[in-house]
Amino acid sequence: MAYIDYYKTLGVSKTASEADIKKAYRKLARKHHPDLNPNDKLAEKKFKEINEANEVLSNPENRKKYDKYGEHWQHAEEYEKAKQQEQYQQNYQGSSGGYSEEDFSDFFGNMFGGRASTGSSRQVKFRGQDFNAELQLDLKDVYTSHKRTLTVNNKNIRITIPAGIENGQTIKIKGHGGKGVNGGPNGDLYIQFSVLNHSKFKRDKDNLYVTIDLDLYKALLGGEFMVDTFNGKVKLNIKPETQNGTQVKLKGKGFTKYKKEDQFGDLYITYQIKIPTDLSEKEKTLIKELQKLR
């Protein structure tokens, strides 16, 4: 495995903060995203390298291992266990000495098919690396379940995105991470969803909230009023003498429940009474007469 300098890939220093790494990744990911560079193999390759670097450096534990073990960081725990076992055997047998850099090289050399070690010839199976990816969607995209193809590590993966998934939620795709070593199991793919809301509705899990303007006369006298829901319009009956800030609930007109495409939360509507402006002289006169009656 050729050594890849992940810091160089993201254009940051080894002392870069988590915020610096995140900022650099997002900037480069936007620049080299395949959707913005169709049929550009170089951009596609660069995009994959950027994602690989971010998967390692954005995770504090993985970054620590990478800083110490370089391209072998995925197998740091196995090396540490082997080191502890060797030290235990040495102490038990009364031997002296410790693990050296040569032992370190022998360990990984044997693992990846290099020279054999002087110890046991048994090959140890190692689980593959877990991959992390971020998928950005619009709120309307997760109102219903749909399928999408992702490209991870040069492989196309067809996944079903369940309806009602939330911003920041992570799902695991088992076995779609890095390939195992010596017949070990593959790692898993973790996808974090970034759900952007460009609608006028505020979402809280499967409930939606919206504020609508209601004219003064409709609020005073009542009547019918058409309002938008997330999925079409409905007719409301406004009660006479409706007060500013009144909230009504439309049952089942909210957002889709997670993985339950036939079930929905509620929609909460708050009325904001709009005071008329630019009154005519006749209107002012009538309002003054109404004031006298009150």
Image (cartoon, grey):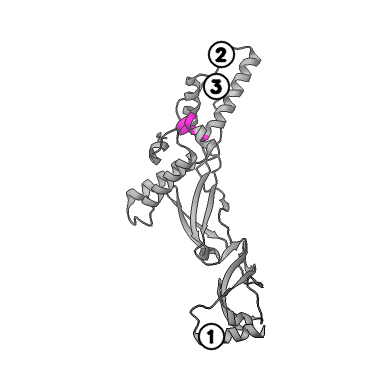
Front residue of 39/142: it is 142
Q: Residue 232 occupies which quadrant of the picture?
A: bottom right
Q: Residue at x 63, y 11 (%)?
A: 94
Front residue of 220/108: it is 220
Secondary structure category for the residue under label 3: loop
Task: Residue under label 2, please give it.
Answer: 97
Looking at the rendered structure, the kind of residue marked 2 is Gly
Is label 2 in contact with label 1 (beta carbons under 8 Å)?
A: no
Question: x and y percent of residue 203 in the render?
Answer: 59, 62
Q: Residue at x 58, y 84 (%)?
A: 287
Mark 2: give few (<14), some (14-19) or many (20+) Cα within 10 Å: few
Q: Which of labels 3 and 1 is toward the front?
A: 1
Mark 1: give few (<14), some (14-19) or many (20+) Cα within 10 Å: few
Query: Which dot marks residue 71?
Result: none
Task: Locate the C terminus and report the quarter of the image it occupies.
Answer: bottom right
Residue 112 in view? no
Of labels 2 and 1, earlier in sequence is 2
Q: CA distance from mark 3 to mark 1?
A: 99 Å
Residue 197 in view? yes
Q: Is residue 240 above or below residue 177?
A: below
Query: Which dot marks residue 119?
Result: 3
Q: Which residues are magenta?
A: 66-74
Looking at the rendered structure, the kind of residue marked 1 is Glu
Task: Locate the N terminus and report the quarter of the image it occupies.
Answer: top left
* Left or right position of 293 against 171: right
Question: x and y percent of residue 158 in the render?
Answer: 49, 57
Secondary structure category for the residue under label 1: helix
Looking at the rendered structure, the kind of residue marked 3 is Gly
Q: Residue at x 33, y 51 (%)?
A: 41
Front residue of 75/27: it is 27
Mark 3: give few (<14), some (14-19) or many (20+) Cα within 10 Å: few
Task: Residue under label 1, please give it.
Answer: 283
